[in-house]
Image (cartoon, grey):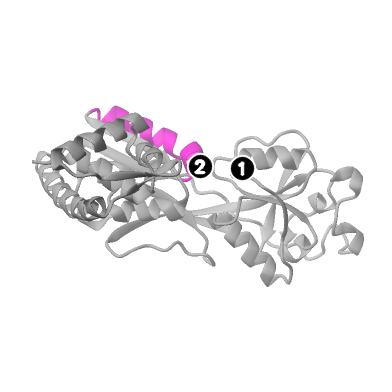
Amino acid sequence: MMDLGRLRALRAVAVHGSVGGAAAALGFTPSAVSQQISKLERETRTVLLERQGRGVVLTDAAQQLANTAQQVLALVEQAEVTLEEQRGQAVGRLMVATFATGARGLLPGALAELRETCPELDVRLLETDPYLAAELVARGEVDLALVQDWPTVPLPVQDGLARLDLGPDPVDLLLREEDPLAALTVVPVARLCGRRWISVPPGNICHDWLVRTMREAGEEPDVHYQVGEFETQIALIAAGLGVGLVPRLGRGTLPPGVVARPVVPEPARRVFLLWRSQASRRPAITAALSAVQRHWQPRPTAPAVPATPAVPATPEHTRLSPRNR
């Protein structure tokens, strides 16, 4: 009989496309995953992985076995949910995926609460982009995902997933305090044209929103610096290299010389949780949902646009001077 742990490892390699990616998703080392695959090859007397360049690819037999493994693991999950529900306790392993600022600004308190109230629950955390997180939940690679999207750039959510909305996460314009726009109470989107941007790379849901918003304002955003971490973006903004739109969740204290100004129409991410509907009765899921809800803090929205802008909308204010860039 094939070992479920080894089938899970093979399925993870099929989903993530590499041993390293599978290891990160499962919370193991790459060598541990490789050992699981090697043991499964001996069990099945079948070659499952073949080297291709610096990586590996699944053989045809391995791909068929990975597809079967997905079905088997789904049945096992149903049985585990039923047993856990009968016990009425949150037990076993709970794999949680999240985006970076959610991991920093929301989950520490919620996970600490789970550790205290559910001592038999083994919670693991994986930081990844919302696009991939939603796919991982649908595929059964993670149990719960904290994700975010924008009203104009909705996150694709597959059938069979349940959703719990937490609320909006407003996004502010970050810029140097000597920038003329810093004198405004709120900054209209139209005043952001002609700016040098610091943003996350393409393919990230926040980058997609920036591009769409600025195009609607009549301009293709001039992104000079593509940086995945908001903390690094803030450091570049502090150096006067450009401006950025940074969410409030997990942002922390701004460095000296950097200020935040609300933008109107207000950009706000929608933060929510995803999990497989068939696991909704699982005590671990319900406990995790409750913990995250208790630690979610609604953030104030932007004030109304002032009747008279504090700074005239003249061309010289559309860009920073070379001294302030």
Q: Main secondary structure of the magenta part?
A: helix
Residue 271 visible in the displayed image: no
**Callout 1: SS:** helix
**128 left or right of 22?**
right
Q: Quadrant of residue 309?
A: bottom right
Q: Position of residue 113 (x, y in %)?
A: 34, 32
Range of residues picked out in magenta: 99-119
Mark 2 residue type: Ala
Q: Position of residue 34 (x, y in %)?
A: 30, 34
Residue for point 42% across, 33% down: 109
**Residue 110 is inside the magenta segment:** yes
Q: Which residue is mark 1?
A: 230
- State the CA–CA distance, disc 2 to disc 1: 9 Å
Q: Position of residue 246 (x, y in %)?
A: 63, 48
Tag 2 near tag 1, CB within 8 Å: yes
Q: Position of residue 70 (x, y in %)?
A: 22, 52
Number of other residues with Cα within 10 Å of mark 1, as a class: few under 14, some 14 to 19, many 20 or more: many
Residue for point 45% across, 45% down: 128
**Callout 2: SS:** helix
Q: Which residue is mark 2?
A: 100
**161 left or right of 203?**
left
Residue for point 91% across, 59% down: 316
Q: Quick one: 18 or 185, which is closer to the camera?
A: 18
Which one is earlier in the sequence, the residue at label 2 or at label 1?
2
Mark 1 residue type: Phe
Q: Quick one: 66 or 5, which is closer to the camera?
A: 66
Number of other residues with Cα within 10 Å of mark 2, as a class: few under 14, some 14 to 19, many 20 or more: some
**Residue 219 is inside the magenta segment:** no
